[in-house]
Amino acid sequence: MSERDEIAVVGAGLAGCLLACFLARRGYPVALYERRPDPRTGKVERGRSINLALSERGLDALRRIGLDEQVMADALPMRGRMIHPVEGEQQFQSYSVSGDRAINSISRGALNNALLTAADALPGVRIAFDHRLVGLDPTTGDMTFETPQGKVAASASVVLGADGAGSAVRGQLLGYGVLTESLDFLDYGYKELTIPPLGGDFALDPNALHIWPRGTSMMIALPNPDRSFTCTLFWPTHGTASFASLGSPAAIEQHFATHYPDLIPLAPNLVDDYQHNPIGVLGTVRCTPWQVDGKVGLLGDAAHAIVPFYGQGANCAFEDVVELDRCLDECDDEWSAALPLFQHRRLENAEAIAQMALANFVEMRDKVASPLFQTGKRIEHALERALPGRYVSRYELVSFSTTPYAEVRRRVRRQHQALGAVAVGAAALLAGAIGAVIRRGRRG
């Protein structure tokens, strides 16, 4: 493939813009297609900000194109969880044993705009907004887009779908019968609320990710540079104490007064936000294969969307881009070899983080307020201090390293097995010692 062959990237969201930057750096002309208008000039859709928790995997990708310092200038580090019980004092739980490592709250829109501007400034990148993919021939790379001016035809040597969980590229491949998919939706949805600044300052501690765990549901809040907080409710979609069960202002106020009493004085627009902000869906997307004949490929949420409870959706997608770039290096830019290699390397890792994200939902909503869970975390941090580099928690490996997700799962399993064996051995020694004392007592 010559450097003059254009690569089409469908989707100018986070992954697509980052991918365009990496490809342009390799010398490829890139056509970046986006179904929406230019988000840098458009109006943000209400209740769809969804702050990101940017951590090491995402930062590693941004460093490679020199954008990390610019992005981090507006980021707010969160060094742990702040637990809000229904009654009693808030409780802080550090993410790292040292207490100084942090995940970073950042606006999805601000990050997208930074990446879009970076891609737009690179030679060889052209961006077409208001282009919605409605046709794709995976054998030729021929595409059809709907635009405000009518249908437009385009073609590319390679077409890469980075267009999110509802990927139009994946849908086209599904229609051609060259791909299968599974969509595993939770019986939960999400809705955003806002806590505005209080007296010109943050109404809550900005150095933490705030969690209101309530068993079968929860709310979280992340800080913003304007000193507000974006709150996200994760509630069942049906049944009692669900989105479906609250309609009137009185019912909404009563529910929050009962289950989130400390939020009431901090969120003056609570009822209006609740009634008018949309309910989003939560689920896991799996598909296979991620590529067809080295001609069309999927990455990020288009290939493997996950639930947001480990804060790894964007981080994982960014890591996809880094891995694809690595595969192109190893395959001398032969896409027919690089795309299958990319899928081979990332498929297991995508499944690992999908499962860990689901497990973390249960931890966040059900366990973090438990004294037993908190004792377990203290023991885990003690082990990390006693065995530096040898015992590392799952959270640290996921959020503060680039250890492959699948290897994180294997390592944590080995650590737990070793601790279990030590505990069994210690119990056996203790039982033996007690037995010896009892036998001596009988002889005496």
Image (cartoon, rainbow, N blue to C red):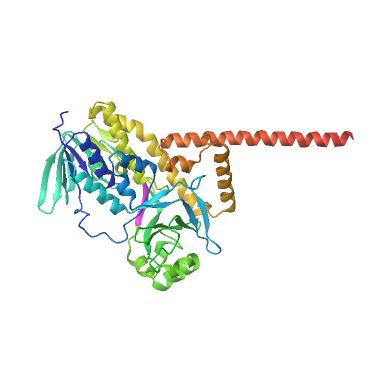
Q: Is residue 282 left or right of residue 98?
A: left
Residue situated in front as seen by the camera: 184 or 43: 43
Q: Give, as a single range, the part of the protein colored magenta.
A: 280-285
Q: How many marks?
A: 0
Looking at the image, residue 390 sits to the left or right of residue 230; the answer is right
In the picture as drawn, the residue positioned furthest to the right comes out as 444
Residue at 48% x, 50% y is 362
Q: Quadrant of the N terminus?
A: top left
**Whole-percent x and y of residue 284?**
37, 45
Where does the C terminus fall, quadrant-wise?
A: top right
- Against 200, residue 71 (above or below) is above
Give the overall secondary structure of the magenta segment.
strand
In the image, residue 315 above or below residue 232: above
| Left or right side of 441 for 397 | left
Kindly tell me whether residue 157 is visible in this rendering: yes
Above-or-below relation of 243 to 404: below
Image quarter for residue 16?
A: top left
Residue 157 among magenta residues: no
Q: Residue at x 40, y 69 (%)?
A: 199
> Left or right: 364 with respect to 66?
right
State the residue lying farthest toward the bottom. Answer: 250
Image quadrant where residue 31 sits = top left
Q: Position of residue 159 (x, y in %)?
A: 20, 38
Residue 183 seen from this side: no
Residue 369 in the image: state x and y as whole percent: 54, 55
Judging depth in this view, the residue of 25 and 415 nearest the camera is 25
Whole-percent x and y of residue 119? Answer: 21, 44
